[in-house]
């Protein structure tokens, strides 16, 4: 039973918690896995308070806690050590900050990949679409402190002038539709050459496996990318790019607003493709185009064309293609959970390396929370997408200390209550809901800071 597996994980992690300060609800992240990865990345450390395991768990608790300050994380460690009869550590956060800098960036990225893959593998076949895994690609941006290092590495938007702007980092994630977990991620600058979401996606495209179905927006609709996906035996469902025009009078008709057309290979080679790779692409590519009419209030697009490599009408009907593309919106909801619920929209780190680590730790914590949601969904036979991510996060924050301090004989009942309470935080079924993008409470009428604070203070004096 899923409940039994979850209980065993909690007992194991609770016992390790008193040794390495592990999070009791991280059911897919094991100490043995961490030690193996530390050896693989050749991370050497002495027996100290801020060992790599302790530092990693503190970093995780920091991104999960409403107060993400380093002082608050060190205060929680100090209270934990005193409560368990250990020697108190210093309340100063300098040692902890240095320990975070020692964590390899590649280690954090590897943990995100491994935990996401573990959650993806645990999904029952019934959670997939016609037995095939569906993955979604999408991107977003995050803000960070305005330091010279961050500004040089990531850049600022073109509409920000003077000292009032903040650097932005662009990131792309590959999500599992069934579980919502992050399978892969890529981080890059906001501006500059090769800084688009499409370029970042190409750097993680090898994480797709044969038989997958990829969902994406119109940005990912290009001949070369579709041909490369077909070479990997990966099907795609994307929206038609604005530079292309769909003419349903041509091609092989499959029904009303449904046909198969032949795309021709472009004559000029894109700069991002090598001569050998471009020559290996096929000269023609059959693509299916489906016109979807949206007659619902609140939707911006009334008519859109969906392009897919699923060309067999007997296996995939026109309605199924349209409904599958509609599931792409789940990526927007998952990104909202990562950025808003987990407070990743504005980062705190002041160097590019730590910014990338902070993004990775948010994604790692997100995968750990998703693992609990999947365990609860499988145990109580509900869909993961019906559960509220924010409600589950609040539950785990409330149950954290109880899972640590509860006697072992009472722990199984506590896990049962936790999983059942997780399924009670449901998202209402609102498929056609629309809301105005307006705020009722106006922000405080402070002027924006245009100069440095020293110059502003001189003006005030």
Image: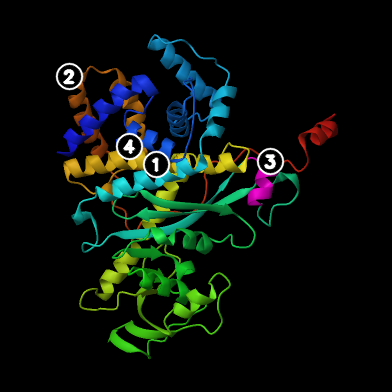
Give x and y (percent) for residue 236. 36, 69
User: Which residue position holds label 1?
Assistant: 366
- Residue 11 is one of the magenta-drawn residues: no
Labels 2 and 3: the sequence-earlier one: 3
Labels 1 and 4: the sequence-earlier one: 1
User: Which residue position holds label 2?
Assistant: 409
Quick check: 167 above or below 403? below
Frontmost of labels 4 and 2 is 2
How far, Cα to Cα, is label 3 from label 1?
Answer: 27 Å
User: Which residue position holds label 3?
Assistant: 147
Give x and y (percent) for residue 301. 44, 69
Quick check: 175 above or below 351? below
Quick check: 73 above or below 27? above
Residue 30 visible? The answer is no
User: Which residue position holds label 4?
Assistant: 392
Frontmost of labels 1 and 4 is 1
Quick check: 175 above or below 365? below
- Measuring 56% from the left and 33% from the top, which residue is drawn there? 101
Q: Which residues are magenta?
A: 145-155
- Seen from the viewer's position, the closer of residues 89 and 453 is 89
- Measuring 51% from the left and 59% from the top, which residue is drawn there? 200
Residue 158 in the figure: left or right of residue 284: right
How far, Cα to Cα, is label 2 from label 1?
Answer: 29 Å
Labels 2 and 1: the sequence-earlier one: 1
How far, Cα to Cα, is label 3 from label 4?
Answer: 35 Å
Labels 4 and 2: the sequence-earlier one: 4
How far, Cα to Cα, is label 1 from label 4?
Answer: 11 Å
Crowding near pointer 1: few (<14 within 10 Å), some, many (20+)? many
- Seen from the viewer's position, the closer of residues 47 and 134 is 47
- Residue 147 is one of the magenta-drawn residues: yes
Name the main secondary structure of what is drawn in magenta. helix
Quadrant of the image occupied by residue 86: top left
């Amino acid at each position: 039973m899923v409940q039994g597996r979850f209980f065993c994980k909690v007992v194991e992690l609770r016992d390790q918690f008193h040794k390495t300060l592990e999070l009791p609800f991280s059911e897919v992240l094991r100490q043995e896995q961490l030690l193996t990865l530390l050896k693989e990345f050749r991370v050497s450390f002495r027996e100290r308070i801020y060992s790599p395991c302790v530092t990693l768990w503190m970093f995780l608790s920091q991104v999960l806690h409403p107060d993400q300050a380093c002082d608050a994380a060190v205060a929680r460690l100090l209270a934990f050590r005193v409560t368990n009869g250990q020697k108190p550590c210093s309340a100063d956060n300098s040692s902890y900050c240095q320990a975070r800098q020692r964590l390899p960036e590649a280690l954090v990225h590897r943990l995100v990949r491994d935990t996401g893959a573990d959650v993806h593998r645990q999904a029952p076949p019934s959670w997939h679409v016609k037995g095939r895994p569906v993955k979604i690609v999408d991107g977003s941006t995050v803000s960070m402190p305005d330091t010279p290092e961050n500004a040089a590495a990531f850049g600022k938007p073109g509409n920000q002038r003077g000292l009032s702007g903040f650097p932005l980092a662009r990131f792309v994630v590959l999500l599992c539709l069934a579980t919502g977990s992050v399978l892969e991620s890529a981080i890059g600058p906001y501006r500059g050459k090769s800084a688009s979401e499409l370029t970042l996606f190409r750097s993680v495209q090898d994480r797709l496996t044969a038989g997958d179905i990829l969902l994406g927006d119109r940005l990912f609709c290009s001949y070369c990318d579709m041909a490369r996906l077909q070479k990997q035996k990966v099907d795609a469902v994307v929206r038609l790019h604005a530079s292309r025009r769909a003419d349903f009078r041509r091609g092989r008709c499959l029904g009303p607003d449904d046909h198969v057309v032949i795309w021709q290979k472009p004559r000029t080679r894109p700069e991002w493709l090598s001569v050998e790779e471009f020559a290996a692409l096929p000269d023609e590519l059959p693509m299916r185009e489906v016109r979807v009419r949206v007659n619902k209030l609140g939707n911006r697009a009334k008519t859109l064309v969906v392009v897919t490599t699923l060309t067999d009408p007997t296996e995939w009907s026109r309605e199924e293609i349209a409904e599958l593309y509609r599931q792409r919106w789940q990526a927007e909801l998952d990104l909202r959970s990562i950025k808003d619920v987990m407070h990743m929209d504005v980062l705190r780190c002041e160097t590019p390396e730590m910014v990338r680590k902070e993004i990775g730790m948010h994604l790692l914590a997100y995968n750990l929370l998703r693992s609990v949601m999947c365990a609860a969904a499988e145990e109580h036979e509900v869909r993961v997408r019906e559960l509220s991510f924010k409600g589950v996060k609040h539950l785990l924050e409330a149950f954290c200390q109880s899972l640590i301090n509860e006697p072992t004989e009472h722990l199984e009942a506590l896990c049962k209550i936790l999983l059942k309470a997780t399924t009670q935080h449901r998202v209402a079924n609102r498929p056609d809901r629309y809301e105005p993008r307006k705020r009722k409470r106006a922000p405080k009428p402070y002027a924006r800071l245009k100069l440095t604070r020293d110059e502003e203070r001189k003006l005030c004096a």
